[in-house]
Image (cartoon, rainbow, N blue to C red):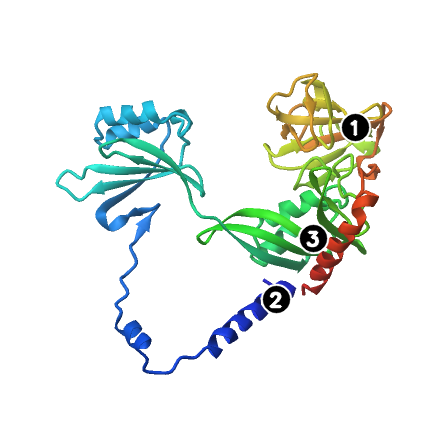
Amino acid sequence: MHKNKFTLISFLIIISTLSFFSCKEKPSGTEEETIIQDTIIPAPVKKLYGIEIDSFNITKGKVRRNQTLAVILSKLDIPYHKIQTIIDNSGDTFDFRKVKLGNKYIVFSQKDSVETVRYFVYIDNPIDYFIFDFGDSPNVSHEKREVHSDLKTASGIIESSLWLSMKEKKYNPVLAIELSDIFAWTIDFFGIQKGDSYKIIYDEQFVDTLSIGINRILAAYFHHAGEDFYAIPFIQDGREDYYDQDGASLRKAFLKAPLRYSRISSRYSNSRYHPVLKIRRPHHGVDYAAPTGTPVHTIGDGKVIAVKWSGGGGRMVKVKHNSVYTTTYMHLSRYGKGMTPGKYVKQGDIVGYVGMSGLATGPHLDFRVYKNGHPIDPLKMKAPPVKPVSEENMPEYRKISRVMISLLDDIK
């Protein structure tokens, strides 16, 4: 983490605290000191998921294909009536039907001749776990591991891509996705240039030393193509959005691209050589090369008006956004969940997955935009901004933005 005002403030607080206590010296040889020296501090009790491990033999396992929790428990020689009691009494605490393949579990067996199982811990995710107690009154409880947050900063200069820059600096790679989401309406991340740079203040969550994700981006800066872009979170009308230094929303009517990470393999053209048909013909869209199965997102809110096979375009989804704009997504390997004509979608919803259905030499998305029924170049489309910070909220926003921009500028 780079030095910034946060670390400086923390350092000053620590120093002042230490100075306070160092001034309160006690005379040597006092009764209190003697008592402290003679006190024996017991060793801490070792626990795993809140259970004292010294009292049990520990066995670990994973849920395998076609295994149910009832089957796993019965193989541990747990009496059937105890398993049934827990199933009957689990209520809303645990759904036995939703055990996930690959999830881990821990068995706590008593140190007796038959190693009787006393506790069974099913780990649902890094935070949530369930303790099955097979004592005199069998029951299951839902527990959560303690989560702590660390305030961090990240910065870098891009040589080839945002992802590689963060990977080289050993930042959490999710930061790249978060940053691309925040600036999705402002910066074309398929057009990132060498020398572009970024600075981020963020909150990362941990369980012990395991990162479980980025909780929140508190402020971000991106320098792209000679321009400076800031992102400051602010709550207005009950919704938190990101705004620039002037209070304009970073959220536009449309996303810049329907894919998060890919590359442009073919641009909008009135005369493109078709790699399959071997002829020249108009290509009124942009091709994004990406692996089969890559999620394709609708660039804006709208109504699905077509989900069908479109000949050379293969599997296609068409979305009507308003009276002016319509978008199509072609060569899909499969459709998004629930994609049917008449369905309303929100910006960012998955409409399908990259494939090579129809006439295609490799997996890619053929993305097209129509304005008033006529095709336009998606890369040159100007999307209108949404509501900025209101006049009545501007004084408060200016205070927040000044502080956050100052902190971003201090990151080296």
**In the rendered image, the vertical position of residue 241 relative to residue 100, given as above or below:** below
Task: Quickly name the residue at label 2.
Answer: 9
Whether pointer 1 and pointer 3 mark residues with C-beta atoms closer than 8 Å, the reply is no
Residue type (three-letter) at the residue carrying disc 3: Ala
> Is label 1 or label 3 in front?
3
Q: Amino acid at mark 1?
A: Ile
Q: Nearer the viewer, mark 2 or mark 3?
A: 2
| Marks 2,1: beta carbons within 8 A | no
Which of pointers 2 and 3 lies earlier in the amino acid sequence?
A: 2
| Residue 189 coordinates in the image, percent (x, y) | 72, 46
Foreground: disc 2 or disc 1:
2
Residue at far front of view: 31
Position of the C terminus by quadrant? bottom right
Q: Amino acid at mark 2?
A: Ile
Earlier-in-chain disc, 1 versus 3: 3
**Disc 3 crowd, CA 10 A, few/some/many (<14, 14-19, 20+):** many
Would you identify the image quadrant in which residue 82 lies? Answer: top left
Secondary structure under the numbered disc 1 in the rendered image: loop
Disc 3 designates what residue?
A: 220
| Image side of residue 55 versus residue 334, left or right | left
Say which mark, if any, is on residue 279. Answer: 1
- Distance CA(mark 1)–CA(mark 3): 46 Å
